[in-house]
Image (cartoon, grey):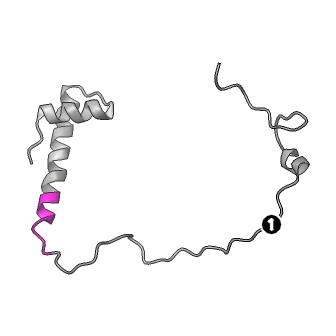
Amino acid sequence: MKIDKNTIQKIAHLSRLEFDAQGEQKMIDSMTQILDWVEKLDELDTEGIEPLTTMSSEVNVLRADEVKPPLPHDKGLKNAPQKDSDYFRVPKVLE
């Protein structure tokens, strides 16, 4: 696949990126290299090879879920930087 100026401009628009002429050419060169590399991978026979889902053979060790009583209201608000009698106070986000 050939990456041309129009393709880069379309990708840049969709990605909300802006390039000058030099940056645009560097991006064309980089993307062309990436696509050439992917095309080289197509030459390999992958028949019978399982897809790779992770780069590590480690298995996650997760703790079992334990049902515990909820945190009491006063303890939940204890370390809050700002609070009133029942709620956390946070800066206004929307006008």
Residue 27 lies in magenta, yes or no?
A: no
Q: Position of residue 74 (x, y in %)?
A: 91, 47
Residue beneath disc 1: 68
Write the residue at 50% across / 77% down.
59
Query: Magenta stretch: residue 44 in it?
Result: yes
Residue lying farthest top? 95
Which residue occupies the foreground of this view, 33 or 46? 46
In the figure, 48 relative to 70: above or below? below
From the viewer's perspective, tell me whether residue 76 is left or right of residue 12. Answer: right
Q: Residue at x 10, y 36 (%)?
A: 4
Foreground residue among 10 and 36: 10
Sort mark 1 into few (<14), some (14-19) or many (20+) by Cα contacts within 10 Å: few
Residue at the bottom extreme, as displayed: 48
Q: Is residue 42 above or below residue 93?
A: below
Percent x, y of residue 17: 31, 31
x 69%, y 71%: residue? 65
Quarter holding the C terminus is: top right
Residue 47: give x, y in percent of width and height.
Answer: 16, 78
Question: Disc 1 on helix, strand or loop?
Answer: loop
Q: Nearer the viewer, residue 89 or 39?
A: 89
> Which amino acid type is marked by label 1?
Lys
User: Image quadrant of residue 67?
Assistant: bottom right
Which residue is drawn at the image coordinates 12% and 41% (left, top)?
A: 3
Chain part drawn in magenta? 38-45
Is residue 52 toward the left or the right of residue 76 in the image?
Answer: left
Q: How many marks overall?
A: 1
Q: Quadrant of residue 21?
A: top left
